Structures are given as structure tokens and as C-alpha cells.
Image (spheres, grey):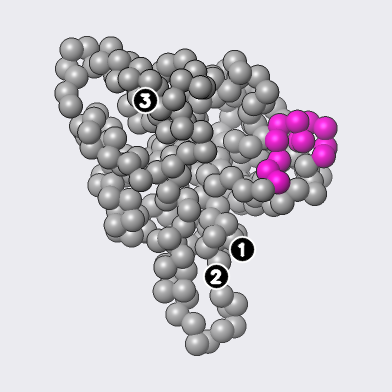
């Protein structure tokens, strides 16, 4: 697993771990323009990109939680390597589950100026929160469910709450039972129910709508981009059947 390290000079460096991975924080977000890639970070060309602000945000929050290491998907995976990408996607649920903290950066939720006495701050951000793009993306489903600690932040980096304090709202938005994202074993929920959690979610590549569910069903399988969603879904069901030891139910 490749992590970012927050150095004493305020900069970041990449570190790779095969065993004894240190405690780390992890970022959850939606991709936008000018994301910082692995190559950008390696050659130092990413600092002027818009996406660098999210990396800095994650680093600062991790430091506040006494965590020197953190993980950001845009730049901790070398996506030019198909082997590395495949390993990362099959490991993603575990990486989020094992993180000490997961910070959700909501780029489309903004707080009004703090000196505006006429504004009800809770209502001001709650509507934006309910309509956030983060709740419509395929990959963020596992990022809500897998980590024990998930904290939500506004565009300005202000804490809105966590998945415990906001559980009722999150349940209303997603239709996911509270116990599912508060630590109950996913095996307690049937296959159709878990599939339904992802029904309204979208991914840029159609196959990712299937691959983003691997951790939700506790299976691994090769990625075959170009196979289309239909065939990927068929392979997913086959892997679920194998892992169920004859107890597969729909």
C-alpha cells in the first residue's frame, strides 16, 4: 500500500508499505478537474492543480489527529499500471475499513459567512448536504460503509458532523439502514438489498458500477474494462456464489 507522508517542512512524500502498514487517514471525495495524479506528485508538477487543495486538507486533518500518513486515491495509485490498479480496486474496501479516520470532502457543500447573523447554519448546509454529488457516486458507497470513523467536511474544510451524528440524515438520503453503515456485518443484509444500495449511484466507466461493489460482497475478481456492465455483473454473481459455500440466496 502506498501512502502519503506529511513531512516536517509541510510537503508530502510517497512511502510504500508491504507489511506493518502504519496508522493512516484516508480521503473520500468526488473527482473534479485538475486532480493530482501519481505522476504529478512524483515529479512535483501537481502543486498548482486545484486538486492539491484536497490533499493539503487531508494532510492537515490527519496531523490534527496525530496521523503522519494518509491516503488519497488520485495520487497514491499509479493508474498507468494495470496490475497496480487491479490490486488497488480489489483492496479498496479493506483500505477504507482499516483507516483510523475517513475524511469526506464535500466540494459542493459550502457554509455561509460566519458573521451572517440572519442565517440558520444548520439549515444552510443541510440542504446542500442532502443534494451532494457524493451520495450519487458508485465508489463512495463503500467509503461510507467500510470505515469505522467517517467525518464530513464542507468545501471550506469545516466539520459538519460524522456518520454517527448525521446517521438519520444519511439514512434518509441513501435508503441504507443505519446499522449497515454503523458496523453490522454486511452478511446480515441480503444480496438484493445490498444491490439496491447502489441502484441510483453512477460511475464514469460502466464496469466500475460492478467493480465498486466487490468489497460490499466480500469478493475479489479480475478487472476487464470493456466487458460492459452486464458481463461484469454476471461474473460478480458467480464470485458471490463461490464465496457463499452453497448458501447463496437472492
State the residue in front, 151 or 222.
Answer: 222
Q: Are marks 2 and 1 in contact (CB under 8 Å)?
A: yes
Asked whether residue 206 is drawn in magenta, I would say no
Q: Nearer the viewer, mark 3 or mark 1?
A: 3
Regarding residue 205, the answer to whether it shows in the image is: yes
Whole-Å distance between the Cαs marked 2 and 1? Answer: 7 Å
- Secondary structure at badge 2 equals loop
Quarter of the image where the N terminus is located: top right
Q: Are marks 3 and 1 in contact (CB under 8 Å)?
A: no
| Residue 40 image offset from top left, x and y in percent | 77, 36
Residue at image mark 1: 156
- Secondary structure at badge 3 equals helix
Q: Residue at x 28, y 12 (%)?
A: 242
Q: Residue at x 63, y 21 (%)?
A: 17
Q: Quadrant of residue 189?
A: top left
Dot placed on the residue nearer the N-terminal end, 2 or 1: 2
| Residue 230 numbered tag | 3
Q: Nearer the viewer, mark 3 or mark 2?
A: 3
Outermost residue, bottom side = 118
Q: Quadrant of residue 168?
A: bottom left
| Residue 7 image offset from top left, x and y in percent | 76, 40
The image shows residue 184, relative to residue 177, as above or below, that is above
Residue at image mark 2: 111
The image shows residue 180, relative to residue 79, as above or below, that is below
| Residue 92 numbered tag | none
Q: Is the residue marked by circle 3 packed among few (<14), some (14-19), or many (20+) residues within 10 Å?
A: few
Which stretch appears magenta? 34-45
Q: Are marks 3 and 2 in contact (CB under 8 Å)?
A: no
Amino acid at each position: 500500500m502506498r501512502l502519503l507522508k506529511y513531512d516536517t517542512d509541510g510537503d508530502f512524500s510517497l512511502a510504500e508499505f508491504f507489511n506493518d502498514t502504519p496508522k493512516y487517514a484516508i480521503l473520500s471525495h468526488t473527482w473534479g478537474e485538475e486532480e493530482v495524479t501519481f505522476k504529478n506528485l512524483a515529479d512535483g508538477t501537481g502543486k498548482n492543480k486545484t486538486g492539491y487543495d484536497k490533499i493539503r486538507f487531508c494532510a492537515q486533518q490527519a496531523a490534527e489527529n496525530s496521523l503522519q500518513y494518509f491516503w488519497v486515491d488520485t495520487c497514491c495509485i499509479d493508474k498507468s499500471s494495470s496490475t497496480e490498479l487491479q490490486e488497488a480496486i480489489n483492496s479498496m474496501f479493506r483500505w477504507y475499513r482499516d483507516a483510523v479516520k475517513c475524511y469526506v470532502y464535500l466540494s459542493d457543500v459550502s457554509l455561509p459567512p460566519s458573521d451572517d447573523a440572519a442565517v440558520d447554519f444548520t439549515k444552510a448546509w443541510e440542504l446542500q448536504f442532502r443534494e451532494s454529488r457524493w451520495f450519487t457516486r458508485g465508489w463512495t458507497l463503500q467509503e461510507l460503509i467500510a470505515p469505522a470513523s467517517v467525518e464530513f467536511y464542507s468545501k471550506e474544510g469545516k466539520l459538519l458532523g460524522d456518520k454517527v451524528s448525521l446517521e438519520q440524515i444519511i439514512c434518509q438520503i441513501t435508503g441504507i439502514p443505519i446499522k449497515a453503515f454503523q458496523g453490522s456485518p454486511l452478511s446480515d443484509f441480503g444480496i438484493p438489498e445490498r444491490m439496491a444500495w447502489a441502484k441510483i449511484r453512477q460511475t464514469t466507466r460502466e464496469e466500475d458500477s460492478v467493480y465498486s461493489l466487490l468489497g460490499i460482497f466480500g469478493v475479489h475478481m479480475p478487472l476487464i474494462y470493456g466487458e460492459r456492465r452486464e458481463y461484469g455483473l454476471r461474473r460478480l454473481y458467480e464470485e458471490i456464489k463461490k464465496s457463499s459455500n452453497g448458501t447463496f440466496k437472492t
